[in-house]
Structures are given as structure tokens and as C-alpha cells.
Amino acid sequence: MTETPSLFSQPAPDIHDALHPEAPALPRVPVSELQGRVRDMLSISDAQAEFLVQESQRLYVNRMKHRFTQLKVAERLKRTNPFLLQIRGAKTVRDWARLQIESALYASEEEAVGHLLEAIAKTCFPGAVIPTYPDDFDFEVAVSDQEVHGYQVKMSWDCMPMSSRKNLSNTIRLVRMQLGKQGKRFTGFFASCYGKATTTQPPGQEYISLSSREFWERVGNGTPNYDVKVGEVCALLCAEFRSEILESLVPALLENLTGAALREIGNPDGTINYAKLFRRINR
């Protein structure tokens, strides 16, 4: 009798195939050349470009390295969905470790790039200064002697829960009242880095929600398709650093996670003992 192949007979993809990036659209360049490339692509000063290169090191590289060196078995087991793990074909503890590293990489990378995009917006937006109320705004701009604009920047258009919307609207009312005493007008903007198709003012809220394209054109002082240039800069800044993380940190982390988790959820042959895994997670 021919044995029917198991739905999960294939192991999880190899760590290189699962995590290693495709060749970047822009060629990787030495760190020493990044400043000049960023300056020319974004049409900013040398000082601004130098700051962004340093910020990319701090926000992307250092944070990612910290996250990966602090990755603990107990934390990753707690975050493991045992139902999805079987659907994704994880048969061995090493498969589990690969999938956990991939999940941690993407989550950490999205957070790091979100902070980098905020830094680019604040650096490149003409006239941007530290906001009067930094808890709700990332920067503000005096568009004239009588008018000030405040900007709250988020990664995407859906990163704003209802409570945050109310807080932002309340802050706008407060700032309007304070600036009104000085004879000035104030407009608050919510700006998402991607995904917002049109500029709107949500019903009942005091802020204007900018389309992502319009926001980046404002950042670029009216330059069309400035978001495309920002995307190229992010790729340029992070491509070399991402490869460094994958090549220097991931292999050792894979071995460490596999070895440590084997005692917790593994069988002697290295396969996952799903009964032990469920009891480890759902105590």
C-alpha cells in the first residue's frame, strides 16, 4: 500500500532562502559613500545627509542588533502560535527556530524603518522644528508669521487607534487656543508614510489626514514622487546593514535557539513534540 505523503512532509524553508534579501535595486555602496549619495538623492545639505546616515545606524543597525542579541527562547515560545506552526509545515525544532527568527526580523525591521522614515521627514521638511507639544506632534512648521502647521507622522494610515485620534484632536484645540492669543492660526496634520490615497478630514476630528503622496511631496518641498526617492534612500541605507545582520547574527542565533528549545519542545531526533509544545504554551 502506497503511503500518502503528509501535508507537512516538507520542512520549513532554509534560513538563507527564507531570510536572505534579493539583490537590492540599488547597488550596495561603502558606508563612506553613503552621505554623498543621500545628499544628492534627497537634495539636502551635507550636514543633513550626515545626520541621516548616523540615524540609520542608530535606528536600524543598533536596534536590530540589540533585538537579535536579546532574543530569548522563553519569549519566542510565548509568542509561538502552535496551530499556525503546523500549518506552516514545521517538523523540527530547527524549523521552529527559523520561523521565529523570520518573524522577529520582519517585526523589528518594520519598527526600525518606521523610525527612520520619521527622521527623514523631520530632516527634509522645509522649516521643520521641534514641536511645542512633542507628545502628539513630531515636528511643526511656521508657514507664515500668522500660521503654524503641526505634523504627526506614522508608518501607515491605519496606525492610529481611536484614543490617539481623540488625543490629537484635543491637543490641536489646545494649541489653537494658545496660538490664538498670539494672533496665530494652527492646523494639525496626521501624515502616514504609505497607504493613504486621499487627503481628508475625518468627521468629528480636528486634524487633516494627508494623502501619503502629498505628505512626501511636502517633505520634498514640492518635488514630485519624493516618496520614490525616500524609498531608494531607505534601501541604500539599510541594504548593507541588513546583510551584515543576516550574515553575522542569524546563523549563531539559529543554532542557539534550536539548542535551547530542543530541551523544551523537542524529541531526541530533533523533531517537534507538539504535545510538549502545547503544554509549554498553554500551561
Image (cartoon, grey):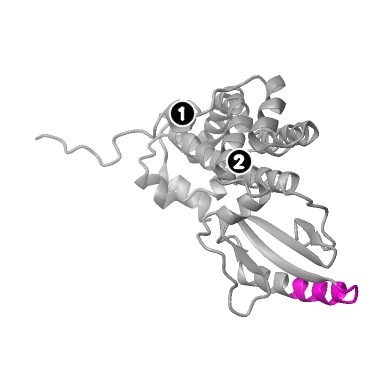
Whether residue 210 is visible: yes
| Label 1 secondary element | loop
- Can you tell which of label 1 and label 2 is closer to the viewer? 2
Asked if 266 appears above or below 196 in the picture, the reply is above
Across and down, in percent, residue 82 comes to: 44, 49
Task: From the viewer's perspective, tell me whether residue 258 is left or right of residue 4.
Answer: right
Dot 2, how many residues are within 10 Å of its Cα: few (below 14), some (14-19), or many (20+)? Answer: many
Task: From the viewer's perspective, tell me whether residue 210 is left or right of residue 177.
Answer: left
At a point 42% along the width and 38% down the height, the residue shown is 272
Task: Specify which label sits upstream in the sequence, 1 or 2.
Answer: 1
At a point 46% along the width and 28% down the height, the residue shown is 22
Residue 180 lies in the magenta stretch: yes
Residue bearing mark 2: 230
Residue 27 lies in the magenta stretch: no
| Magenta stretch bounds | 170-183
Asked if 134 appears above or below 179 in the picture, the reply is above
Q: Amino acid at mark 2?
A: Val
Across and down, in percent, residue 5 comes to: 21, 37
Across and down, in percent, residue 154 comes to: 64, 55
Foreground residue among 103 and 97: 103
At a point 57% along the width and 46% down the height, the residue shown is 224
Tell me the number on the disc at residue 30.
none
Task: From the viewer's perspective, tell me whether residue 225 is left or right of residue 205.
Answer: left
Q: Amino acid at mark 1?
A: Glu
Foreground residue among 273 and 156: 156
Whether residue 136 is visible: no
| Label 2 secondary element | helix
Residue bearing mark 1: 22
